[in-house]
Image (spheres, grey):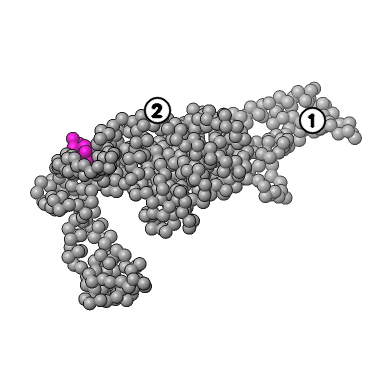
Amino acid sequence: MNLRKIYYKKTGRTFLTIVRSYREKGRKNPTAVTVRSLGYLDVLEKEFPDPIAHFEKVVEEMNKAEKETEQPNNITFYKNELSTGKEHLQKNLGYAALSKIYHELGLRMFLTNHTRNLKAEFNLNNILKILSFSRILEPCSKKRTYENREWFFENTDFSLDDVYRSLSVLNMLKDDILLHIHKKIKEQYNRSTELVYYDVTNYYFEIDEQDSLRKKGVSKEHRPNPIVQMGLFMDTKGVPLCYRLFEGNTNDCKTLIPILRDLKRDYDIGRTIVVADKGMNTADNIISLLLNRDGYIYSQTVRGAHKELKEYILDKKDYQWVNDDFKVKSRLYPRLISFKDKDGKKKSIRIDEKQVVFYNKDFDKKAKADRAATVIKAQDLVVNPSKYKQAISHGAAKYVENLNYDKDTGEIIVVGNQPMFDEEKLKEEEKYDGYYCIITSEYKKTDQEIIDLYHGLWKIEESFKVTKSDLKARPVYLSREDHIEAHFLICFIALTIARLLENRLDNKYSITKIAESLKKMTCINEGQNWYLLLYHDEITEIISEKMGIDMKHRRLTLGQIKNFLGATKKT
């Protein structure tokens, strides 16, 4: 606030008022609102020896009192005030928690140092922040994110073309960014790489034609669209370690060794144990890991196992019941593995492998419940074969004997014997319900340790679910390969920030719940740069306590908000 002296030329008199000045975005000059009208100077001189000096002191005391109490004096509302349609009255404040982690990872300084010589006309850091935070709070296309950029209290002085140009730069810096983030996490969160989790998923594109990267392959979502494969490594805390994109028609098992080789070289990682599902359980992968003195913990298919292993699994001998619902046993088993060397010559090698087998009654019940609908469908198919075609009999058909299809129409046709329900097939499958097998090179670890380590794989599966549902990483509406690569880099950064925040909150809340709370934590401009905070809950309260971000105020000035956000950017 300050004292304003208004001189009226016609009367030669001066009128004194106390005004509050504030600056609105988009306006060159500050706006002033009258807080108190004092009167004409010549009249006030009859009451005060020096009215100007007196009221300047009053203003000084008012400013001091307001600063100490952090309460607004008055906000002036105009009855007939109209919206211009250009204001961005509601903004988000929840992203402050994301901003703190973003800056703790040192991304601003990294981007500043690596773009000095690029002569870019845009600030890459400002764009990456908006793209990353939006991917967590309001995931949408790059164009829509740009249009919603004023939702944040950030510098958004860049164009939509700048956003697309930034994608090319981000792709160019991708490997360096991933390595930088890893070093920061290792330094700040004591990341261990002695054991890592690996899995593969794919992302579809709503296009018809394939190209060098987007190819038709086995889609996890059973879509006919071209896809890209993503291999992802994760640490034991569930935080992404690194990723790599592969052509859509790449077999899952072929992705592990190339990305692991790069990971160990670029991140200077020593011996590590790779935990993965049965899709990575191949002779080539096992031999490659062992030759590099690494280890593995893989799941092993039970129904598709060789005869000797099946007999061992079903043999009740040596099982130890941990409780009424769970039993386990293990053995060190010599296995002969055949593989091709670098010259393509076939070789065999014997390895000593620990096999851990366990049975869980709950898993048994679930397997039977999951199969029930398929069995009912198979029984109906036998009675009413004309209702089904090859395309819709998938799954149920394996329980039906004497099943034939018309090559042209796909309709079921009866040739010779009538279709029959295969009771023996069902009984054979039910024998293995509830049984699981894990194979590992780490024979010194206890059975329970191996089981616990393998069960940690659910976190990486959940990470894929988060990227596809919460972060909406697909479908991807970009066509250039460098832009596609940058899109997944942004998704990786967003997932990393979200996971670190989840860990900071002691894993009490899911990423979905955290994002919902932060998205709701908005504020609205009441006028004269005062903002009313509209949301607060248990999660934002814990964030305030755990991360030193005060999110409990009811009202804040724009200056206080800038200071509040500025504190999250200090590293």
| Cα distance in 3D space between marks 2 and 1 | 58 Å
Q: Earlier in the sequence, mark 2 or mark 1?
A: 1
Residue 538 in the figure: left or right of residue 427: right
Crowd rating for badge 1 (residues with CA inside 10 Å; few <14, some 14–19, many 20+): some
Q: Residue furthest left?
A: 317
Q: Nearer the viewer, residue 51 or 334?
A: 334
Q: Name which residue type carries label 1.
A: Lys
The image shows residue 333 at horizontal and vertical percentages of 14, 42
Residue at 60% from the left image edge and 41% from the top image edge: 162
The image shows residue 509 at horizontal and vertical percentages of 39, 43
Residue at 80% from the left image edge and 22% from the top image edge: 49
Q: Quadrant of the N terminus?
A: top right
Q: Nearer the viewer, residue 294 or 14?
A: 294
Q: Is residue 255 above or below residue 52?
A: below
Examine the structure image and report whether residue 301 is included in the region drawn in magenta.
no
Q: Name which residue type carries label 2.
A: Glu
Tell me the SS state at disc 2.
Answer: helix
Question: Does residue 553 show up?
Answer: no
The image shows residue 208 at horizontal and vertical percentages of 48, 58
The dot on residue 5 is 1
Q: Residue under label 2, please give it.
A: 187
Question: Does residue 347 show up?
Answer: yes
Residue 10 in the figure: left or right of residue 118: right
Q: Are marks 2 and 1 in contact (CB under 8 Å)?
A: no
The dot on residue 199 is none
Residue 413 in the figure: left or right of residue 170: left
What range of the chain is rendered magenta?
A: 440-446
Residue at 53% from the left image edge and 28% from the top image edge: 113
| Quarter occupied by residue 531 | top right
Q: Is residue 72 above or below residue 510?
A: above
